[in-house]
Amino acid sequence: MDGPLWTDTHAPALADLPQDDVRERLSRAVDEPMNLVVQGPPGSGKTAAVRALAAAAHGDPDNDLIEINVADFFGRTKKEIREDPRFESFLTGRSRMAKRDMINRVLKESAANAPMSGSYKTVLLDNAEAIREDFQQALRRVMEQYHRTTQFVIATRQPAKLIPPIRSRCFPVPVRAPTTDETIDVLADICEAEGVPHDDDGLEFVASAAAGDLRKAILSAQTTAVEHDEVTMTAAYETLGEVGTDDAVLAALSAAQAGELTEARSALDDLLHDDGYGGGDLLREILRVARSKSDASPEAVARLHALAGEVDLDLVEGSDDRIHLTHLLAAWGAGRSTTEAAVRDPADA
């Protein structure tokens, strides 16, 4: 997709956030900085809301908002972390440092640096449900040490994964998935600002297809506009019928059948983090693609459905989506139960 993403160019200001409760709670944190847990489903606007808060609170938000996606640490090797230009200056000459110490150093240095404007800065930890408990304990200590000059905002779709000492130090900001009507309103404003012809049916189709994922809806509308110069029902139907993640899901299934667990896990990571799937949604996509597009036998598809029942409850209860979906594919590919997969694949636990 050429040009800047609409999710960036049309990011909302604090006063424009569509959910009243979110707008009011974040507005309180402008003049009285406080640590926050911004919680809600993927694509609901958590990160956009925090950026809106930073723009209102800081004279130099580009420097005083520090964004750290947890996947930048926990899904990467030590070499990749050291070579990341955002962290390189903190880790130069520390090649023997353990990964845990590397992460702690980056957090401390980010919190310790003086704000460029005003009396405090904001550190956003995104996708925080992936932080292990021992790292959360280290985070708690950093939050305590630098509470006078740093506001910590933790964005997560699974707040229950946070340890009580962190939750008790943060003010909760629940962000719900937007309704279809709210999504349509956002899309209409963006299309009008971009000068893109659109109709009600086209916007409703895009909004409904996104199923409460505002980020997905905006990017789908932009893709439709790029390909057809309009967002109408016909244009959206043709575009969204071609754009999707079926190939990535199919790649994960094929890798699992071939016993290539690393490739299957990598495909799941992309779907969960880059495409914004929740665990339950991705599980349904895996089953749909297995039925309709894979070359698996009917017996194999039926077995996948049976195995899915074993992990569905874990996903609903907020367990780690990546681990359970990886175990599902590992079990399916190897012909064993998900419990056996978890025992035999300790690297995923």
Image (cartoon, helix red, strand yellow):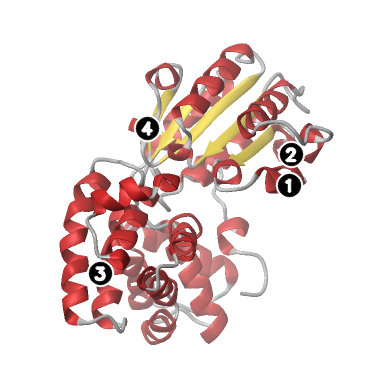
As displayed, is residue 260 above or below residue 167?
below
Query: For the residue marked with disc 3, what is the amino acid?
Result: Leu
Query: For the residue marked with disc 4, what is the amino acid?
Result: Lys
Query: For the residue marked with disc 1, what is the amino acid?
Result: Asp
Q: Which residue is mark 1?
A: 84
Instruction: Assign the C terminus to one quadrant of the image.
Output: top left
Residue 34: percent from left, percent from top: 52, 20
- Characterize the local packing of mark 1: few (<14), some (14-19) or many (20 or more) Cα atoms within 10 angstroms: few
C-beta proximity under 8 Å, tags 2 and 3:
no
- Characterize the local packing of mark 2: few (<14), some (14-19) or many (20 or more) Cα atoms within 10 angstroms: some
C-beta proximity under 8 Å, tags 1 and 2:
yes
Task: Judge by depth and name the residue closer to the eye, 19 or 217.
Answer: 217
Q: Which residue is mark 4?
A: 161
Residue 37: percent from left, percent from top: 44, 30
Residue 87 numbered mark, or none: 2
Residue 319: percent from left, percent from top: 31, 41
Dot 4: what SS?
A: helix
Q: Which comes before the other along the chain, label 2 or label 4?
A: 2
Q: Rounded to the nearest whole Å, what is the CA distance between mark 2 and mark 3? A: 39 Å
Dot 3: what SS?
A: helix
Q: Rounded to the nearest whole Å, what is the CA distance between mark 1 and mark 3? A: 36 Å
Q: Rounded to the nearest whole Å, what is the CA distance between mark 1 and mark 2? A: 6 Å
C-beta proximity under 8 Å, tags 1 and 4:
no
Q: Which residue is mark 3?
A: 287
Q: Is residue 34 visible?
A: no
Q: Is residue 171 left or right of residue 135?
A: left
Query: For the residue marked with disc 2, what is the amino acid?
Result: Phe
Q: Rounded to the nearest whole Å, what is the CA distance between mark 3 and mark 4? A: 27 Å
Outermost right residue: 93
Q: Is residue 148 visible?
A: yes
- Characterize the local packing of mark 4: few (<14), some (14-19) or many (20 or more) Cα atoms within 10 angstroms: some
